[in-house]
Image (tube, rainbow, N blue to C red):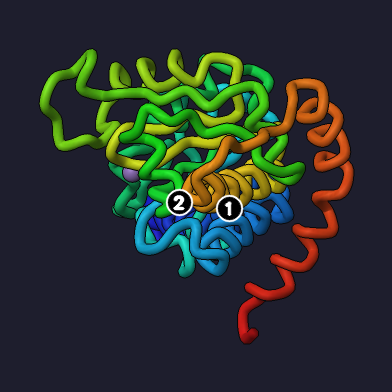
Amino acid sequence: MSSFSRFAAIAVATLLSIATSRAQDAIPSVPRELLEDIATGSRVLADLGVVDAFGHVSARHPTNPKHFLMARSVAPAQVTAADIMEFDENGEPVDARNRAVFLERFIHAEIYKARPDVNAVVHTHSPGVVPFSVSRTPLRPLYHNAAFLGEGAPVWDIGKEFGATDMLVRNNAIGKSLAAALADKSVVLMRGHGDVIVGPAVQAAVFRAYYTDVNARLQAQAIGLGSDVTYLSAEEAAKADGVNMVIMDRAWALWKQKVQPGK
Ligand code: MN
C-alpha cells in the first residue's frame, strides 16, 4: 500500500468514527439531562392535553447562550432526547443532517434574543387559551396555580403588522414582533392561533403552559356563572407565584413519571 493510500485509509476511518460518535450523541456539548428535560416537557404537555400534533418546547443552550435546543419536526408526544437539535440565534439549524425542522422556530429564536432572563420557551395551540386570543376579555389569574398571569397576558395580533397571513410565525420579522408583544411577561396569546410561555427553566415553562390552559378553561366557566368574578389581586398573585416556583418540582416529578417510555 502506498503511503498516500495508507493516509487515505486512515482519513476515511477517522471520518467514519467521528460520524458514528456524532450519531450516538446528538449534541455532545449539552448535558444529557437537559436534552431529556426538553423531551419530557414535550411529552408531558401532550399527556396533559395542552398540545396535540403541534407545539414545541425549547431551552437555551447552556454554554452558548445565543443558541437554543429544540426537537426536529415531530409531534410533542413522540419527542425523545435523540430528536433534539441545536439552532443558532436566527433559528437556523447548526447541523441539520437532513432532519425536518419546525416552521415556527423563529418564535424561540427571537424570544431568546430579546429576553436574556428566559431559558425555556413553550409554544402551544392550547384549546382553553384560544378563545381568549380572539376575545376582548383578558386572561387573568383566577386561582393560585396561575398566579404568574397576574403580570398580564397580552394578546399579539399578527394581522396588525403583517396583514392577512397563514397565521404562522414563519420568519424572524414575525418572531421579533411577537417577542416585542411578550415584552417582560411570562405569557403572550397569539390571536387565532395559541400562546407562547417562557420561564427560567424547562420545568417552569411547562408548569406555566399547563396552568395557563387550566386557568383559561376555569375563567370561561366562572364568567359563564354570570356574576362578577373575583381574580387574584396583584399582591396575592406575586406571593402565590413565589410559592409555585418552589413547589413545581412535585408536579414535574409526577408528570415525568407518567410519560416515561413504557408507561
Ligand atoms: Mn403554532
What residue is drawn where x is 46% and y is 61%?
Answer: 76
Q: Position of residue 215 (x, y in %)?
A: 59, 47
Position above or below: 214 against 53:
above
Q: Position of residue 31 (x, y in %)?
A: 72, 48
Q: Quadrant of the C terminus?
A: bottom right
Q: Quadrant of residue 202?
A: top right
Distance Cα–Cα, label 2 vs label 1: 7 Å
Q: Are marks 2 and 1 in contact (CB under 8 Å)?
A: yes
Please state if 94 lies on the left or on the right of 29 as rendered.
left
Q: Residue furthest left?
A: 164
What residue is drawn where x is 79% and y is 34%?
Answer: 241
Q: Nearer the viewer, residue 199 or 216?
A: 216
Read off the residue under disc 2: 128
* Neighbours of disc 1 within 10 Å: few (<14), some (14-19), many (20+): many
Read off the residue under disc 1: 214
Q: Residue furthest bottom?
A: 262
